[in-house]
Amino acid sequence: MSDRKHFPLLIGSIVVLLVMASSLFWTRIPAEGYATLKETGVDSFQFGYITKKSQIPDLHEWMSGQQGKAIFALPDQLYTPDPEKPLPYVYPIYDRTRSEEQFNQLYGYLPQQPTLDLGRTVYAVDYGNARFLFLRSDRQEKEQAAWVHAQAVTNPKPHRIALLDVPPSPVLWQALREARVELVIAGENVYGLEAAVVQEPSDFSPKDHEGYGVWKPGASIDQPYMLMLSYQNDGMVVKATTGDGEALDQMELSAGVLAAANSKETVAVGIQQLWRYHRGDASVKAVIPEGFDVTGENPITAPFHLPADDWRSPDYSDAAWKTGRAPFGHTNRLQEEKRLQTRFKPDPASPSYYFRHTFFLSEAPKEWKDLIVKLSYEDGLILYLNGEEVFRDGIRTGLILPSSLAITNQGTWYREVSLRNHVNKLRIGSNTLAVQVHRSHPGSPNLLFDMSLSYIK
């Protein structure tokens, strides 16, 4: 055979070898018991969960178009991989639709756990600053619980998410709670570790399991949806979205808040508490203390005593006020409207509402290191602690009347503010929070209020 005939064969062999080498490179065979995805070069990551209600006609074709956008998880029964076109960024949850042998064969790219005799059905995936734990609830619960603990010890990631086909057993629940796994997805249920939840979705039921609240998107969403997780640094948002990406509802969690909870942060007043409230009008009395500059140019600095009939006073009787659960307000934004627990009707006659909440402390606060409030409000807010102003935002200084207008602001959900300089205003026994919230215009369609208060010793 001539050299001219050998040349095409040589080129063809080189091409085949290059293709085989590239397939090994992209397969990224795990060698440490869990898969580590290549970093994307950005500090924000997307993770999708396909639910039974997603109703995507050609799932494989749809997912093929998502390469590079996110990684995805789904119950095994929803998906059969194409052996000719495997999608290694798709991660199945073992749900006993197939045998373990079939599962292991179909998903050969999944890692195996050397400490567990469960093949590839239990595994971990690192993606960005999160570790995803794929579990099962039908076998070796104690062994899986020990494995979850080991993941928490060896995992430097700020976010931990567990996925199962059904809610965990009590043994696994305890392991997840102790490992501070902040998010658990089980079938159509989404469980958030309450210490990490900073924004609750609609239909959120706290303490469904000890330490965890449950969100059931399918109970309130009557159209196909999927879950999309986006996380950056210590924050994570879980959105129920349409296939086109339209957000239908969401829950927000913070690993930073969770870390603070682990560092002896104690909640004195939680979010979504009961508050007394009253529409802003002339019946809500507020005195002008001696030395107070109504222009705000020379604010009063000395403490003063409020009479008992001043609505900000701890001694004020708010028995005639209405009682409701936060968040309060009204809005023309549908998704935010779903989060409101007590809904008001827009009132052109008054742009303001007043709120009061009494709480009790059993220990002296003077040695505390910090006092923290997390505030949700739109547009402007003034906060009083035991009759003294401690925070103001979105509204001018000086004298504020029920008719005063705030500065136009986008609604703020659970903004964290330190009040460490006001710890001395607290006392053992009864303490009172008083808050006034003002809209930017009497005809504004949006008003919002909720808050929490915690302290660190």
Image (cartoon, grey):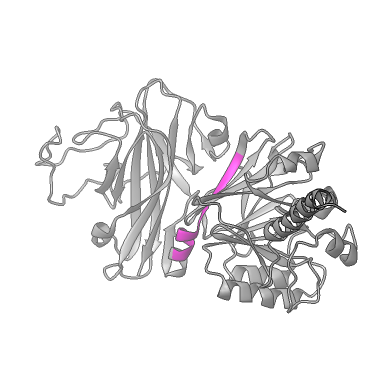
Q: Establish if 294 lies above or below 434.
A: above
- Image quadrant holding the C terminus, namely bottom left
Q: Residue at x 70, y 56 (%)?
A: 22
Q: Residue furthest front?
A: 2
Position in image of residue 55 (x %, y %): 79, 38
Position in image of residue 207 (x %, y %): 61, 59
Q: Residue at x 68, y 75 (%)?
A: 147
Position in image of residue 344 (x %, y %): 49, 31
Q: Nearer the viewer, residue 337 or 79?
A: 79
Q: Establish if 314 lies above or below 328.
A: below
Q: In the rendered structure, which segment of residues is drawn in magenta?
A: 249-259
Q: Nearer the viewer, residue 389 or 146?
A: 146
Q: Residue at x 40, y 33 (%)?
A: 410
Q: Establish if 142 lies above or below 446.
A: below
Position in image of residue 389 (x %, y %): 25, 47
The answer to whether residue 228 of the structure is visible from this angle is yes
